[in-house]
Image: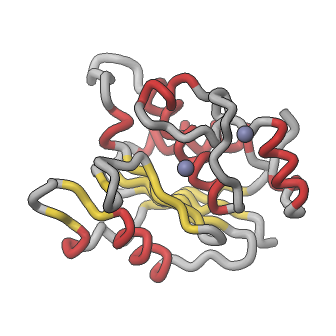
Amino acid sequence: MENEIYLLYQAKIHPSLVEELATELKKVYNLEIIVDVLKLEPPLRAYDSTRQQYNSDILLDYYASHLRAGGNNRVAVLLDEDAYVPGLNFVFGEALPGWGGIVYLARLKIGISTLSSTRLLVERTVKEVVHELGHSYGLRHCSNPRCVMYFSNSIMDTDYKSMFYCKRCKDVLDNRGLRHILKEY
Ligand SMILES: [Zn+2]
Ligand SMILES: [Zn+2]
């Protein structure tokens, strides 16, 4: 079946964080979540040494061309890096419709000390993964600030929104014949 999400994480990310993330994703999606270490490190040519950030457009091109997702399969790449797209200071993630997306952890760690629980980081990361995957399934930004498809201008927006698609976004998925990918919630 072509109904899988490949959750691929950069080797420097702690596997326990990714395991918790996979558990959370199963609350949203009625899909198989396949977790694996990412074998491809971000290419140096995508790194802007002046900004000390990766160009997310280049990374998206790179990963989408090397990691194919057939049919309704999706890829979610997790990088513990900071990234931008031209015109924006930073991005939490970026998506490619029909393929999947990349989520960047650097800015999601803001305000999280090493002593505090990683729970908040898991929550933020799952929201950004579900958001980028939403774009990959054809969803646009949503005006409902509790909906996961709400655009996060800052980490406060991310903390305020839920990890779930709102009724309106679910209806859009329904119209695209994708209602079956979601759990009932
Ligand atoms: Zn978005
Ligand atoms: Zn919505």
Instruction: Return the residue nearer the eye: 7 or 109.
Output: 109
- What residue is drawn where x is 90% and y is 58%? 175
Q: Position of residue 163 (x, y in %)?
A: 64, 34
Q: In the visual, does 32 lie left or right of 111?
A: right
Q: In the visual, does 82 lie left or right of 168?
A: left
Outermost residue on the bottom side: it is 65
- What residue is drawn where x is 32% and y is 61%? 86
- Name the quarter where the N terminus is drawn: bottom right
Q: Position of residue 73 (x, y in %)?
A: 69, 69
- Name the quarter where the C terminus is drawn: top right
- What residue is drawn where x is 50% and y is 31%? 158
Total numbered labels placed on residues in the image: 0
Q: Position of residue 93 (x, y in %)?
A: 45, 52
Q: In the visual, does 67 lie left or right of 52?
A: right
Instruction: Return the residue nearer the eye: 54 or 37.
Output: 54
- What residue is drawn where x is 77% and y is 36%? 166
Outermost residue on the left side: it is 50
Instruction: Return the residue nearer the eye: 74 or 40.
Output: 74
Q: How is the image coloured?
A: secondary structure
Q: Position of residue 53 (x, y in %)?
A: 22, 55
Instruction: Return the residue nearer the eye: 165 or 121.
Output: 165
